[in-house]
Image: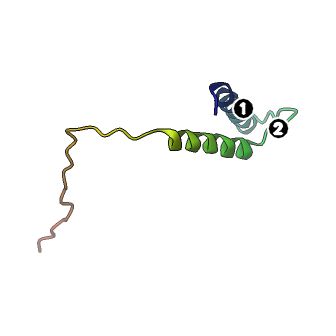
Amino acid sequence: MDLNEKIQIETEFANAAYKNFVAKRFGMTPCCLADLQDITIKRDACNWEELQNKELVRTEGLVSQAINCVIEIQD
């Protein structure tokens, strides 16, 4: 997916989200409603595709620590 297509999808999503906000907040529905759900699905698919194409890079020095979350109740 090229950058122009991604920008177009993000712009469509932003416009639809704004129109949805205005319709809910002020009761002003636009003349042509964009289907926010369809555009959201298209945007999420675009983001998922972008995540699938990235290579994971290993970083050294990361430390994980286990935390004991057991709470003891004393009578």
Q: Residue 60 got which mark?
A: none
- Identified by mark 2, the residue type is Leu
State the SS at label 2. Answer: loop
Quadrant assignment, res 32: top right
State the SS at label 1. Answer: helix
Work out which quarter of the rendered image holds the C terminus and state it. Answer: bottom left
Q: How is the image coloured?
A: rainbow
Residue at position x 73%, y 35% from top?
Answer: 16
Determine whether, in the image, residue 28 is placed left or right of residue 40.
right
Residue identifier under label 2: 33
User: How would you rate the neighbour count of disc 2 (Cα within 10 Å): few for under 14, some for 14-19, many for 20 or more?
Assistant: few
Could you say which is closer to the camera, residue 58 or residue 29?
58
- The residues bearing labels 1 and 2 have C-alpha atoms spaced at a distance of 12 Å
Determine whether 26 is above or below 36 in the image: above
Could you say which is closer to the camera, residue 2 or residue 6?
2
Mark 2 and mark 1 in contact (Cβ < 8 Å)?
A: no
Determine whether 19 is above or below 68 in the image: above
| x and y percentages locating residue 74 in the rendered image | 11, 71
* Residue at the bottom extreme of this rendering: 75
Q: Residue 12 got which mark?
A: 1
Residue at position x 63%, y 45% from top?
Answer: 45
Determine whether 26 is above or below 66 in the image: above
| x and y percentages locating residue 14 in the rendered image | 67, 31
Determine whether, in the image, residue 46 is placed left or right of residue 62.
right
Quadrant assignment, res 39: top right
Closer to the N terminus: mark 1 or mark 2?
A: 1
Residue at position x 64%, y 34% from top?
Answer: 1
- Identified by mark 1, the residue type is Glu
User: How would you rate the neighbour count of disc 1 (Cα within 10 Å): few for under 14, some for 14-19, many for 20 or more?
Assistant: some
Could you say which is closer to the camera, residue 26 or residue 9?
9
Could you say which is closer to the camera, residue 74 or residue 54?
54
